[in-house]
Amino acid sequence: MGPGKPRYAAIVDALAGDIDAGRLKPGEQLPTHRELADRLDVSVGTITRAYAAAERRGLVRGEIGRGTFVAGAATGQYRGAELGARTPGVIDLAVTHPLYSQGPDLSSVLRDLSRTPQLNELLHYQPNQGLWRHREAGAVWMSRFGLETTADNVLICAGTQHALTVTLTSVVGRGGSLFVEELTYPGIKALANLLEIKLVPLPVDEEGLIPDAFESACRQRRAKALFTIPTIHNPLTFTMPETRRREVASIAARYDVPIVEDAIHHLLADDPPPPLSAFEPQISYCIAAMSKVVAGGLRVAYLVAPREAVDQLTQAIWATNWVTAPLCGEIAARWIEDGTAENTIQRKRSEAAARVVIAREVLSCRDLYADDHGLHAWLELPQPWESAAGFAAEARRRGVAVAPADVFAVGGKIPNAVRLSLSAPFDRDVVTQALRKIARLLDDAPCCGPPIV
């Protein structure tokens, strides 16, 4: 214990070290407050304070009536404000960035904007759902996805996370329940925690959500809506075929379960089927952000919703953001109209494909899954590696950050796998360097002693 350091803080540091080293595994139950207090010869109050501090750091989670459980690797996974964090000397393969090297030229559109009459109107308050012109551009953009709609059904949101906040607030509500794939986008987990929404995991296979399991859960009325990522799934990389999309959408319509669809990677895939929303638009909410495929910092997402839901969604936008910055909406609209968005997508598809090839070459003979144009890959770990969190912690110590499976897991058994973001490094040489470190680590046996606690 360092000089002047409280005992509870030293216990939290010891927990973090054990989790990082893989001595404590995700989902593992920790001793009760009394048991650990007796073992360490401290007061129960000290343990209570330590567990509370550990939970705030995302190391553990408390479940009423059950106890305290390990949440994940202390440094191997990303959480909340740590998403954009950078660690000197560590190559980031944990967070999926939008291939900045292939991004559009902002200076060009800003020059054009500077010559626009009434430019300052873009700094005025505008309608909560977005300017009509921007909503029209959104409708054009959504046709690129195979989803025909009109500006009446389009709302402008400040990125996917804002669109999800607006939609779940309106469709599910605080304290409601939401179906998700058993491994899902971490942002939906964070949002569910904020809104006190219970996530109900559904099993998947290599083609995505299993229809029979979904129908069984619908029959039991276990949740109010379904959240899904059917194209280049995050993290599992599969793309759901059209026949299954039709089946899932039909089940949702039969049981009146709204579909909340994140189409974030749709335009990167080779000839993907239409969104699920195209098959049952009267119950569907499709979110298509510009972030991964065009520019992450633009913070524009198009939310296509049933006409009768638009007023309520507009109220939710007013309550959470008032209005998405009209300047951003104008830039997005111009890039859609002049072809910049489409050209950017094609460059990013090409760059992503090259990085996937590198990953398959460096990690050959491994259980690696990736879409040909995807921004991430899913790596199943071989024996003797038994802990994805432990693997992630060791990878970070060797200079590479990866995202272990517990970041994405919703209940149940956590797979022994990690997600590798191939898009975060600025150039391919750094991607290759990081993947070679991962390959060497895969061949090394983990070495862990007994946990401190």
Image (cartoon, helix red, strand yellow):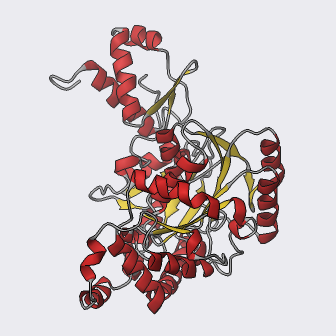
Would residue 288 be found to the left or right of residue 249 on screen?
A: left
- Residue 84 to residue 138: above or below: above
The residue that appears at 80% across and 49% down in the rendered structure is 255
- Residue 222 to residue 14: above or below: below
Who is closer to the viewer here, 326 or 441? 326
Would residue 419 be found to the left or right of residue 77 on screen?
A: right
The residue that appears at 29% across and 25% down in the rendered structure is 10
In the image, farthest residue toward the left: 3
Would residue 381 be found to the left or right of residue 39 on screen?
A: right
The residue that appears at 44% across and 35% down in the rendered structure is 19
What is the x, y in percent for residue 266? 60, 73
- Residue 363 to residue 65: above or below: below
What is the x, y in percent for residue 163? 50, 59
Would residue 277 be found to the left or right of residue 14 on screen?
A: right
What is the x, y in percent for residue 343? 48, 89
Which image quarter is the N terminus in? top left
Question: Splitting the image into 4 quarters, where does residue 47 fall?
Answer: top left
Who is closer to the viewer here, 159 or 380? 159
Numbered-mark total: 0
Residue 443 in view of the camera? no
Which image quarter is the C terminus in? top left
Question: Splitting the image into 4 quarters, where does residue 20 fall?
Answer: top left
Question: Splitting the image into 4 quarters, where does residue 8 fall?
Answer: top left
Residue 73 in view of the camera? yes
What is the x, y in percent for residue 298? 37, 71
The residue that appears at 64% across and 66% down in the rendered structure is 365
Who is closer to the viewer here, 385 or 119? 119
